[in-house]
Amino acid sequence: MKRSLDEKERLARLRLARSDSVGPVTFRDLLRHYASAIDALEALPDLARHGRRKNPLRIADEKEIERELNAIEKTGGTLIVIGDSAYPAQLAALDPAPPVFSVKGDISLLPRRSIAIVGSRNASAAGTRMSGTMARDLGAEGYVTVSGLARGIDAAAHRASLGTGTIAVLGGGIDVVYPAENAALHDEIAERGLLVAEMPPGTEPRANLFPRRNRLISGLSLGVIVVEAALRSGSLITARFALEQGRDVFAVPGSPLDPRSKGSNSLIKQGAPLVENAEDVIAAFDLPTMNRLLEPVSPEYVPPSPPKKDISQTSREKVINALGPTPILKDEIIRQTGLTTAEVNVILMELTLADRLHTDTGDRVSLLPEA
């Protein structure tokens, strides 16, 4: 049974998530090393100082958090923090899980079985028709449609699934409409479906934020259907996230003469099941070769106690010497330095908060040059 978070801890988690240099990975690591977000917030200045941060670390204060909560409430939305009883199990199973996000609309859609449909913004007429048909037919079988509210394939999937359940994951704040041409659809989803946003209200969509949006699209879903996608597209990024998360990826075939189908056809060549209708997708879930989600962990972290001893400067130098511009696994750093996992994790957090560490996929890290 999920326990509700204490309100002070809940607000501390939001403050922690909104502080400088604290992304989902660092948020996860901080909660694993300290008894609570309250304790992690107190530790941030010393961690940044030990990492030799040049400028003072900005820690989100209570007034900033109050403004965000008021802005969400003003839009009619709700904030969900990891550890809340409403936090969906499929997102809690991600590593790292999104620390916080806001929602507006029918929150009962979050725990339901969902399938993502993504594809080209500059979609063909056949592609938008396929997207809508897939969404409508999957909805009739009880599946919620998840997509990114972009023009083209995304918009067609949302429109077709308004009556059966649709979730739109936004690249900006919950109150920011993008693109402008989807304003009416944005409002309709808020009324009949669900809007989800990881960024604070008022955040304008930017190119560097869309990968985080794509990761949520796949994370909320059992699988991802790519209808049309160029070889370099956000849809293929969503497909990659899906595979990393243990979700299934499906692709609708397209003409080899159409560049909008190069990416989706490439997925099929790489082994993604070719699907032509909702029945193909549902049947694929019954195959023993398809990915299966593990039983998700509880959304509430139960972190171990922090390290008992202080970290020595010698230990810090060992970790820095083991790092370089080439990404390396954390386990390799532990092996090379002979330090404990807890010691290495604390030192890496210090470097992250000093903006001296880059974290890649698979917990690979590399040292950034000092400014």
Image (cartoon, rainbow, N blue to C red):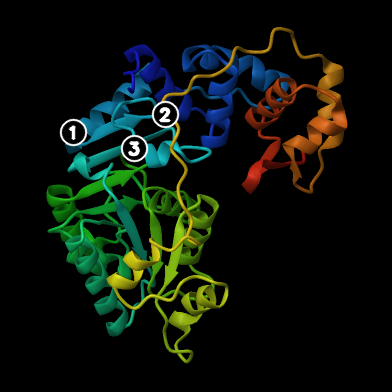
Q: Amino acid at mark 3?
A: Pro
Q: Amino acid at mark 2?
A: Ser
Whole-angstrom CA distance, mark 2 to mark 1, is: 30 Å
Q: What residue does disc 1 label?
A: 74
Where does residue 218 sit, x and y in percent of width and height?
Answer: 42, 53
Q: Quadrant of the N terminus?
A: top left
Q: What residue does disc 2 label?
A: 298
N-terminal of the two: label 3 or label 1?
Answer: 1
Where does residue 127 sit, x and y in percent of width and height?
Answer: 32, 79
- Secondary structure of residue under mark 3: loop
Query: In front: mark 3 or mark 1?
Result: 3
**Residue 241 versus residue 151: which sits nearer the camera?**
241
Query: In front: mark 2 or mark 1?
Result: 2
Quarter residue 180 falls in? bottom left
Where does residue 17 sit, x and y in percent of width and height?
Answer: 46, 29
What crowding class fits label 3: few (fewer than 14 Cα within 10 Å), some (14-19), or many (20 or more)?
many
Quarter residue 281 falls in? bottom left
Q: Horizontal placement of 81 versus 247: left or right?
A: left
